[in-house]
Amino acid sequence: MSLTEDLKQILETVLPTDPSFRQIEKAVIDSSISDCRRYALEGSVDAFLLSAMRLLALPDNGHTRLIPNDAISVLPLRFVSVGRSVQVIGAASGVTAPRGELIAVNGAAMSQIEATATEFLAGTCQRKRVIGPILLAWPYALTRLGFSSNGGTTEYRVRDENGQITNLKVANGNTVPASTLYPRNEHGKADPAWEPQTFVEIKDWQELGLSITLPSFFDPSQSALPKAISDTADRVRACSDTPLLIDVRGNTGGDFLLTMPLIDAIAQSASQQVVVLVDKFTFSAAIVFVAILKHRLGNRLKLIGEDMGDGLTFFAEGGLLELPTSGAVVRYSSAFHDWQNATSDETTPPEIARQIVPTGALNLDSEWVVKPTGEDTQSALYQRVLKSVGD
């Protein structure tokens, strides 16, 4: 098979199904398709994939995008967005790299690279910050964006926490499969292979309150998550006079309908302040969870962290399309969600439309941007947040 088969799959499955493309002018779509077809006929996998990323980014809907991670090779460095900067937080086995903020690539400032890359990245500014760092390690992407070097190496300028600057040069031929450093569902952790070990983690901080960590709402079994949610709802009801901290940072979504018993328990039982921690790695069903909770609790809920990965109006559902030739994956949408104004259309599943509420804007109460860290620092954070609630 050739890359034209991959393009055919996108044109026959994604574009007719995904309602987010309805708002894009046909001429704009056709121009992007033409670029994809040209590179497909040339047989250039990297060029085709980057062009397909641009095509699928046209609706600015983060649920609709091409995920190249399983199909490309990258330089052996792991970059992750932390706050508004990009950090070097890891490297492939056997590779030594300085940790710290990435401030330039081949002499180009990060702001310049990010501005040029934006048309290839789907979704909100926060979504782009989540999925964009892989481009910084992808030699072909740097060349296409106009930021390659002439000497067969890529030079990264890194500033550590003490302000010391290191120039790191990596041979462009020294690559590894991107999937080893960049997971499909980027979670922002230092270990790219991190996966949640449980659906709920509860800890009683005695007089300070109760913390509830919810790392994922994706449960293929459809049984483990409901059980964990039910048990947690019972715990919340038994601690109605206790401040709650709920952490959905890094929760990329799943099925929010399975979490409704916990939302009900919190709304009905929590008499004290409820704090929810969010970040740019909070997506999809996790955002809906926060939106409904905010609608139910009003001023009793305090939202801290950083803006989440999507807005409140987006397209979701849909599915994953495995491209047969390149091996890349396309995430596409099929349903409209509007949790800001509580509107729906014919594409919104009835079971979701029944739950949609007008949350308005989800404004942060304060900004606590926390780097990916170990358990001790997370424990310290939880205690600090809960203590601030009680003050």
Image (spheres, grey):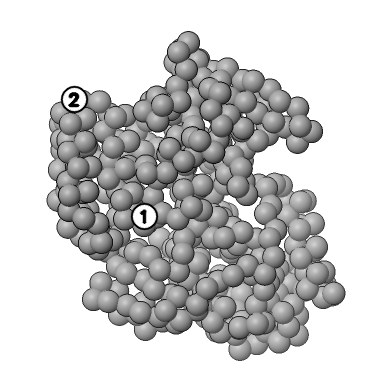
Residue 334 percent across, percent down from the top left? 27, 64
Q: Residue at x 45, y 22 (%)?
A: 148
**What crowding class fits label 1: few (fewer than 14 Cα within 10 Å), some (14-19), or many (20 or more)?**
many
Residue 186 percent across, percent down from the top left? 49, 47
Q: Residue at x 61, y 75 (%)?
A: 232
User: Which amino acid type is marked by label 1?
Assistant: Asp
Counting residues from the start of the chain, the first of labels 1 and 2 encountered is: 2
**What crowding class fits label 2: few (fewer than 14 Cα within 10 Å), some (14-19), or many (20 or more)?**
some
Q: Does residue 127 appear in this view?
A: yes
Q: Is residue 358 above or below residue 3?
A: below
Q: How many marks?
A: 2
Residue 387 percent across, percent down from the top left? 82, 69
In the picture, residue 94 is in which quadrant? Answer: top right
Report the residue marked by disc 2.
42
- Cα separation, mark 1 vs mark 2, equals 28 Å
Report the residue marked by disc 1.
60
The mark closer to the camera, 1 or 2, is: 1
Q: Is residue 265 left or right of residue 22?
A: right
Q: Residue at x 50, y 15 (%)?
A: 153
In what quadrant of the picture does the N terminus appear?
Answer: top left
In what quadrant of the picture does the C terminus appear?
Answer: bottom right
Q: Is residue 109 above or below residue 67?
A: above
Q: Is residue 117 above or below residue 355?
A: above
Residue 252 percent across, percent down from the top left? 49, 57
Q: Is residue 91 left or right of residue 205?
A: left
In the picture, residue 219 is in which quadrant? Answer: bottom left
Toward the viewer: 57 or 28? 28
